[in-house]
Amino acid sequence: GAVVSQHPSWVICKSGTSVKIECRSLDFQATTMFWYRQFPKQSLMLMATSNEGSKATYEQGVEKDKFLINHASLTLSTLTVTSAHPEDSSFYICSASPPPDKRGEKLFFGSGTQLSVL
Amino acid sequence: AQTVTQSQPEMSVQEAETVTLSCTYDTSESDYYLFWYKQPPSRQMILVIRQEAYKQQNATENRFSVNFQKAAKSFSLKISDSQLGDAAMYFCAYRSRGSSNTGKLIFGQGTTLQVKP
């Protein structure tokens, strides 16, 4: 089956630094990718929808200047947490959407990135 | 806007027994998909089962089956012959099917399932 690769799996950084997380669809072209955030024992919260070649669409309450999303190719989307602070510590998960004619099929998830900001 | 509600934060089942996880949703759309995802301690999201709203027949996948009640907007998951490996957090999710939709998933709050040996 299709695979979505997410890196890194975990990252520890100092407060004030920036962290980049990559999400790659390995065997299909993902025109749309999604970024979720998950706190311990809670649900996945959609942060933004990433569209190849255009600006990301952010959910209400998500700071677009803090969480920079780039989707420069059909197989890669990146999330950069800028000037990270301890409250940004969380588990971030990406997912890649198949083409519109196959949207009813699986939405493939990356394995997630645990970010810890000291 | 669509919403998904899971009213059982935690459930427990004895190994080999059957358990049902509840999910309700709200939407004004007539065509959509519903999913159950499993998130084990590894935190990898795993698709358990999928239901297309226009299909009346309830989806089944081996020991997993759903009770889809479209009019009641209810979508419960039944796990038969529960196994220790079924212990995980389970999420109910909704996805629009219209051509203008982005394909995003809307998740419920999740239900943590404990399986007792």
Image (cartoon, helix red, strand yellow):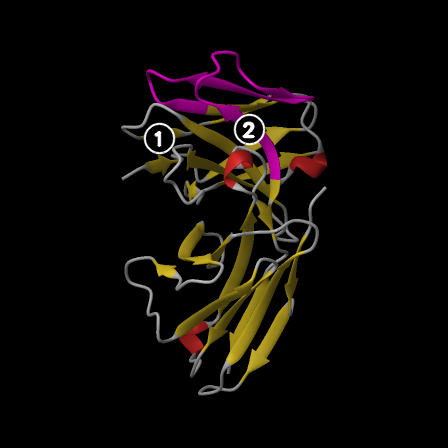
The chain letter for the residue carrying disc 1 is B
Rendering quarter of residue B82: top right
Q: Residues within 10 Å of mark 2 (few under 14, many from 20)?
A: many
Q: On the picture, is A115 further left or further right than A16?
A: right
Q: Is residue B80 left or right of residue A78?
A: right
Q: Give x and y (percent) for residue A63.
A: 33, 70
Residue B86 drawn above or below residue A92: above
Image quarter of residue B17? top right
Q: Is residue A116 above or below residue A50?
A: below
Where residue B7 sits: x, y (%)?
A: 38, 34
- Say how many tags the image has: 2
- Identity of the residue drawn at 64% across and 67% down: A7
> Above or below — where is B8 with respect to A49?
above
Who's the residue at 60% across and 75% down the image? A11
Residue furthest top in the image: B57
User: Residue B94's spot in the image, x, y percent?
Assistant: 42, 35
Q: Give the residue pinned by disc 1.
A: B25
- Part of the protein shown in magenta: B47-75
Quadrant position of the N terminus of chain B in the picture: top left
Of the residues shown, which amino acid type is indicated by label 1? Tyr
Amino acid type assigned to the residue bearing label 2 in the image: Arg
Residue for point 63% across, 39% down: B87
Q: Nearer the viewer, residue B27 or A33?
A: A33
Residue A56 place in picture, x, y as percent: 40, 62
Q: Nearer the viewer, residue A36 or B75?
A: A36
SS under mark 2: strand
Residue B50, which numbered label?
2
